[in-house]
């Protein structure tokens, strides 16, 4: 596989990984290094996972490939990164959201947002998977 293909493949695999984290943050809450990496764009680009066949790359390479291969480009991937951080931090803090206690209006609002995001994630994941499969078949 050529470098360009590897870097473009990283975009799809990273997107899937972020969606998995958003959908099931309990599975990842013990991985402090993952949370640390997700807190910055550079950390996301350098993210490496042998299990998921995700290789690190430079941030500018990640951004340009995301803009080429992913609908919404880098901004969409970056929003997924932020959502994954929110989901992990919420799961780690259990009774506290990133924006406040569950006893406050802001805390309750954030909990509702995360629940809606998880539901949306499951619906979109099927859509993206089907589109990606269709695109592969067309090549």
Image (tube, helix red, strand yellow):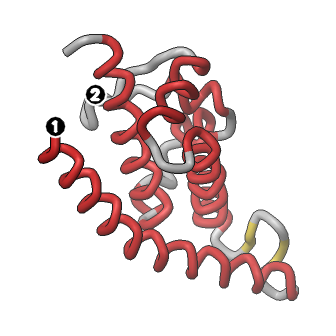
Quadrant of the drawing holding the C terminus: top left
Up/down of 115 relative to 3, above or below: below
| Of the two numbered discs 2 and 1 in the rendering, the one whose residue sits closer to the viewer | 1
Q: Would you call the spot at circle 2 few (<14 residues within 10 Å), some (14-19), or many (20 or more)?
A: few
Is 85 or 16 nearer to us in this picture?
Answer: 16
The local secondary structure at tag 2 comes to: loop
Please give the residue where the numbered disc 1 appears in the rendered image.
Answer: 139
Q: Residue furthest front?
A: 138
Q: Residue at x 57, y 28 (%)?
A: 63
Residue 11 % position (x, y): 41, 35
Q: Residue at x 56, y 73 (%)?
A: 117
Is 34 or 11 nearer to us in this picture?
Answer: 11
Image check: 105 left or right of 21?
Answer: right
Is 122 or 102 nearer to us in this picture?
Answer: 122
The answer to which image quadrant residue 138 occupies is: top left
Residue 7 % position (x, y): 38, 22
For the residues marked 2 and 1, what is the alpha-carbon distance in whole angstroms?
26 Å
Please give the residue where the numbered disc 2 appears in the rendered image.
Answer: 50
Residue 80 % position (x, y): 57, 52
Up/down of 129 relative to 33, above or below: below
Is 122 or 72 nearer to us in this picture?
Answer: 72
Which mark is drawn over residue 17? none
Image check: 113 left or right of 24?
Answer: right
Total marks in image: 2
Up/down of 37 relative to 64, above or below: below
Mark earlier in primary sequence (2, 1): 2
Q: Residue furthest top?
A: 2
The local secondary structure at tag 1 comes to: loop
């Amino acid at each position: 596989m050529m470098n360009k293909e590897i870097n473009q493949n990283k975009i799809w695999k990273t997107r899937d990984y972020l969606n998995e984290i958003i959908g099931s943050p309990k599975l990842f809450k013990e991985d402090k290094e993952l949370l640390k990496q997700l807190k910055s764009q550079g950390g996301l680009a350098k993210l490496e996972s042998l299990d998921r066949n995700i290789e690190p790359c430079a941030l500018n390479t990640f951004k340009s490939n995301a803009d080429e291969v992913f609908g919404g480009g880098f901004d969409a991937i970056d929003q997924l990164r932020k959502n994954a951080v929110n989901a992990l931090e919420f799961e780690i803090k259990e009774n506290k959201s990133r924006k406040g206690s569950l006893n406050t209006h802001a805390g309750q609002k954030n909990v509702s947002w995360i629940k809606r995001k998880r539901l949306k994630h499951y619906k979109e994941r099927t859509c993206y998977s089907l589109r990606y499969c269709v695109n592969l078949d067309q090549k």
